[in-house]
Image (cartoon, helix red, strand yellow):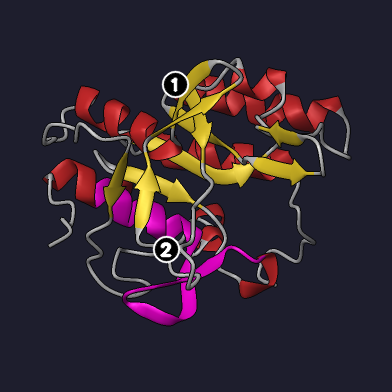
Amino acid sequence: DELDLQWPWPRAVHGQFLDIISKGRPAAIGFDIVFPEPSSRGPEDDKALADAVGLAGNVVLGAAFTEVKSQYTVKEDLNAPIPVLRERAAAFGFVTVIPEEDAFVRSALLTRAFQRSELSSFDLHLYRLGAQAGIHAAPLPEKRFVLINYRGGPQTFLTIPYYQVLNGEVEPDLFAGAIILVGSTSPILHDVFPTPFATHGDMPGVEIHANVLETLFQGIPVRRA
């Protein structure tokens, strides 16, 4: 509403956003937004975002696993970012969260097999970039997954509206040395889930990733009794 734009927004807008926050020299930037198809606005729109991603140099893009089962086959698709974007990114990793039988998200995969290779998650790539940038990081767990140690409910982490960055209402210095996660919080886009601290299903996926990163950096995964 503030930007007067329909979703999905032009990718050039994401490029403008990246240019602004990059001035603050964050440790890493993670886009929990999937770009598996070329922009409907043409190749120049994709190029504008790709140029910003390349200039920033520390952007991790998202990919989303999908699985289609039939009687005899199972088809998996990674839905990776289009080549012009992933070639300029520092990395891309899967953002897919895995709810348990009661629909709650309590754990996160760090690696996953796909077409005879082992892929790193969105969170794992951000952990590595953050550690390289000097953020104190605990050793990674030996398992492929972690039980997330949630800090609290929605907006436990500092949450800044996207439009405020674009409109110049936020100083880029605020992002210095931090890991910036960009993602939707609107239930309309179906990226909200129940968690132990959001039992009504109102925890945005992007904030689940923030809790995963906090768990990894602090080295405090929950352990089953």
Give the x, y percent position of residue 166.
56, 53
Work out whether 215 lies above or below 144.
Answer: below
Q: Nearer the viewer, residue 13 or 40?
A: 40
Work out whether 33 lies above or below 106.
Answer: above
Q: Residue at x 35, y 61 (%)?
A: 106
Q: Quadrant of the C terminus?
A: bottom left
Q: Which residues are magenta?
A: 190-214
> Residue 105's mark?
2
Residue position marked by numbered label 1 in the rendering: 57
* Image side of residue 157 versus residue 33, left or right: left
The residue tagged with tag 1: helix, strand or loop? Answer: loop
Q: Is residue 141 visible?
A: yes
Q: Residues within 10 Å of mark 2 (few under 14, many from 20)?
A: many
Alpha-carbon distance for marks 1 and 2?
A: 31 Å
Q: Is residue 172 visible?
A: no
Q: Amino acid at mark 2?
A: Val
* Image side of residue 127 versus residue 70, left or right: left
Q: Nearer the viewer, residue 152 or 50?
A: 152
The quarter holding residue 84 reads: top right
Give the x, y percent position of residue 73.
78, 34
Q: Residue at x 49, y 54 (%)?
A: 98
| Residue 218 sits inside the magenta stretch | no
Give the x, y percent position of residue 183.
53, 54
Q: Quadrant of the N terminus?
A: bottom right
Q: Please, which residue is most extreme toward the front here?
A: 72
Work out whether 127 lies above or below 151.
Answer: above
Which is in the foreground here, disc 1 or disc 2?
2
* Image side of residue 195 versus residue 55, left or right: left
Q: Nearer the viewer, residue 146 or 6?
A: 146
